[in-house]
Amino acid sequence: MRLATSRIGARFPASAAFAIYLSVAFVYFGLRLVIESGSQYIGSYDDPQIPIWSFAWWPHALLHGQNPFFTHAVWAPAGVNLAWVNSVPIISVAFAPLTLLVGPIASYNVATIALPAVSAWAAFLLCRHLAGKWWPSLIGGYLFGFSSYILGHVTGQPQLTAAFVIPLLALVLLRYLEGDIGKRRLTVLSGLLLAVQLFISMEIAFTLTLGLIVALVLAYAFAPSRRRRLVSALVPLAWGCVIAAVLASPFLYYALTSVRVSGFQTPSDFVADLLNLFIPTHVEAAGAGWLHDVSKRFPGNYTEQGAFLGLPVIAIVVLFARNRWRSSGGRFLIVSLVLALLASLGPELTVGGHGVIPLPTPFGHETVTVPGVGTKFLPLFDNALPVRFALYMSLAAAVIVALWMTSRPTGDVWVWLLPALAILLLIPNPAAKIWSTTYKIPPFFTDAAYRTCLNPNEVVLPQPVRAGGPEMLWQVADAFRFRMAGGRLQTSAPTSFLHPPSIARISIGDPPGPDQSKLLLAYFAAKGVTSVIVDKAQAAIWAPPLDRIAKRQDVGGVLLYHVAGAAPACPSS
């Protein structure tokens, strides 16, 4: 359904658009790594440690003949299924040569800068195909690749900033409907793209599949002249899904053999606030100051408050709807945007942090009553956060902006003023303390002199464990020479670490209590822990209960406790 038929000029190639996006991404996210002192990774707190660990794990596992989909390196001895972890396998493998050359942290930083640019470029290609003009398409691509959704997730979730599959799949389907490609190419290309998305994020693959179904239904309803071609696309798309399932079969096998039957996060806690459409958060420079007092009441956290479009974009959407509603493409885009917005709002309309009225959507409901079955969890719906449908809303809005700009006279001041204001409102807030984290890895994990302090493949408990601890970087720096009876690859510990209560309290990182030494001994026995490594920055918290169990060694910038078995020879600091 080509919405514009003007010829595409050859003045600027598509590669120039990518170069612009990449340069913008570097200025936004990478420049501070160069000008500020200290070792840093992009993002805040410890969320980035998950993809950093994954960037190291995949090449390590493949080169050492280990199963990359299930690891015993963390949550030892049971291990954890990585199919339900944001381990970004295809991105980790794609960046493996760089990881082996410069290390996983630097490789992660490069990927974090590049992925928004790639997503913007994919949206540019879609916009250029539809709008036919370079500059409007450049702006449309920017509004998608640097949307508030993408900006919030730059801080540690590359599986969500790698959003390039969605516009590319839309482009492939459009080209088929227009007769540019045949059934065979549609089958192959859709299969490859869906497989890539499965290896990036199963959640987005799920919502993309739902979005594809809805898009086909809307296109059938709004474009009668394309119905025969739409129907003919169903079989190639079905075969594309088969190809994707075959290509991703190892990943799907581990996903289906350990189905996650409850959500990582409560979906109803992560919904879009209606005011967020108009009001940015402190992630954007425009949302700092008094607006932050409003936005901090939005549901969820700043990474999941990405529904912001801004008044300029909303004005363009309204103008576009007024002028193009009678066209099939115009109705398709407007209704798609509205449905994505509705899905992002979740089960209840929220305004300024206050629930107003229930909404008819399955997203955000933890359980659904199935006739004849009763109330059951729906795992895929339960693990799809409603607010993340803002991704699809931002893509529809980006295309609308590009098409609206193309349809306006070149001398119209508003054709450049409104998009320029939209871009200004999305500029990241450089004062927000979310863009980089300074880290320091003790010599214990980097200096070969301390390699004898732990036996190979020894089970270690790092303290602090989970949130707030640097243990994932420790294991990466030591090239997975030891296993950890803990870790942070997901929001909750595996089931085997949640019972009995003595195990659960340690595994979730509860601060030590009066009986902590007893609880630690129970944990050591249950998980085969032979050594404990304590971050010296938090020694005042964790050392007292451990001092009652074993003798400490101040070595290599950490406190080391051998709590079982013979202590290996270890040099003093």
Image (cartoon, rainbow, N blue to C red):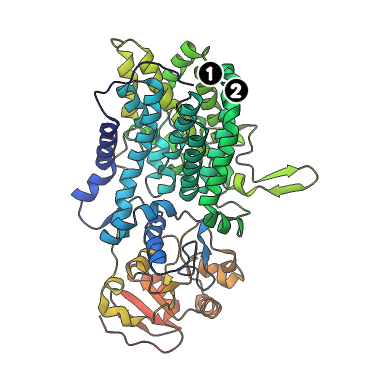
The residue at 34%/47% (across/down) is 112
Q: Nearer the viewer, mark 1 or mark 2?
A: 2
Q: Position of residue 264 (x, y in %)?
A: 55, 52
Q: Please indicate, yes or no, whether residue 516 appears anywhere in the rendered image.
A: yes
Q: Secondary structure at mark 1?
A: helix
Which mark, residue 331?
Answer: 1
The spot of residue 471 in percent (x, y) is 39, 66
Is residue 256 found left or right of 548 in the rendered image?
A: right
Q: Is residue 179 above or below residue 117?
A: above
Residue drawn at x 56%, y 24% as measured from the top left: 229
Secondary structure of the residue carrying numbered label 2: helix
| Residue type at the position of mark 2 | Arg
Say which quadrant the C terminus sits in. Answer: bottom left
Above or below for 158 versus 96: above
Residue for badge 2: 228
Would residue 355 be visible to someone looking at this image?
Answer: no
State the residue in front, 527 or 209.
209
